Amino acid sequence: MNQGVLPGSQLAERARRAIPGGVNSGQRSIPGLTDLVITHAEGARFRDADGREYVDYHAAFGPPLLGHNDPDVSAAVAEAGRTVDLCGVGVTRGEVELAETLVELVPSVEKVLLTSTGSEATFHALRVARAATGRRLVVKFQGCYHGWHDAVSLNVISAPDRVGGRDPISTGILPEVLEATLVLPFNDAGAVRAAFAEHGHDIAAVIVEPVPHNVGCLLPEQEFLSALREECTRAGSVLVFDEVITGFRHDLGGWQAISGITPDLTTMGKAIANGYPVGALGGRADLMELFSSRPGGPAFFAGTYNGHPAVVAAALATLRKLRTEPVHEHVFRLGDRIRAGLADVFAGLGVPALVTGYGSVFVEYFMTGPARTYDDLLRNDASMFIGYRRRLLEHGVFELPLNLKRSHVSYAHTDADADRLLEAAEAAARARLAAGDPVGDLAGTSTMGGAVR
């Protein structure tokens, strides 16, 4: 058989023989889609090895804000490959230009360092916060995800009985590392003030997704963000905004530009380079100067692929397009249209649903409101959520069938794509309701929950 036309099931089986689980990230093995092999992606669509095409609203958890394989980004990467390569010494002109652009765009950023992933950026943010303060404790919030490293690998999508305690998402983490992280409820300014009253002298950093998009979309209350800033300032703690998702997708200056709350450090990634693997950490100059990229800096910082010419070129091309074309206007308009249309669809069918989001992000919770805190999301009907999204696949529309996951609009999506989504939504919801029985097996559909111990 021609190796180029193998069916997805055969390719997936080959993958499982060579790769644990057949995928290279724990959130890519999707129940019901374990034989999915993607062969082509362009604009707002991707195609699998069996010839099925989907309008893609998952968008790789959000990076391709411009759409898959944006021609301007691809051209910039190709040009970089013809002119410069990774040399691992000094700096390239592209790195200088990207750093200057990030300093110009993001309010908190006085100096910036590039990483390869958002997880690396959040890791270094907490390391330098501890180096600067000499303190031990880190504060994070239930429902927020900040990457794979031990200090923050807890309390993301927790089961009800694990909310309120430490809920690690992995085994193999030292208990003393977890004990140095305080977990608080999101949008609870009182809990923040109480934690600082008790532990403020030993809190090195507070890290927060200003919008916890890893559980869909919990919009922050201004009082809550203000309390973070006030308490960190009063205690001398470092406030870190994890804008890996919100940065550039919601505003060129991130959520801090929208809210007017300026953190001490900001982590960035995803939409910064339209899907190429780049992250960044920036903030106050006095904190950034503590890294060993400055000779004598006490906080070690390194990475062979940091500032790789290809990803730098992708980031510069992406940011140029975001600044010169009506990208945000387009995706915000479509996002508004989709949220309103989905709400009408579910209301017309008598389905309890809360359609929320911001700008280009939308999520359909199958519950009544509100959605202020993670506790509210425990009311979401996971069976309906997963079953509905599985039915969408039958209509060539892809929203990730994992519980609480958000969906994204890109610059490549059109009004016709929005129409198709709304038509598919009504058909999928009707089919799910007609099925009657709940989805029988939800195993594996709620990722980043508590580790099996």
Image (cartoon, grey):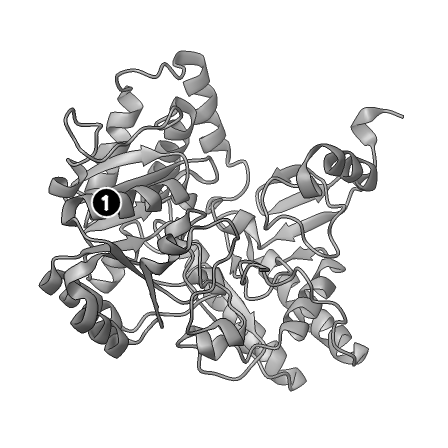
At which x and y percent is residue 198? 19, 72
Is any atom of residue 208 visible in this view? no
Q: Nearer the viewer, residue 255 or 74?
A: 255
Res 144 seen here: yes
Q: Height in image: 240 above or below 187?
A: above
Residue extending furthest toward the right = 1
**Up-down: is 240 above or below 357?**
above
Q: Quadrant of residue 426?
A: bottom right
Please tell me which residue is depicted at 41% across the width and 29% down the height of the picture.
Answer: 311
Residue lying at the far bottom of the rendered structure: 350
Q: Which corner quadrant of the image does residue 270 belong to? A: top left
Left or right of 54 in this view: 76 = left
Name the residue that disc number 1 marks.
Answer: 105
Q: Is residue 350 above or below residue 274?
A: below
Secondary structure category for the residue under label 1: helix
Q: Quadrant of the C terminus?
A: bottom right
Q: Alpha-carbon neighbours of circle 1 within 10 Å: few (<14), some, or many (≥20)? A: some
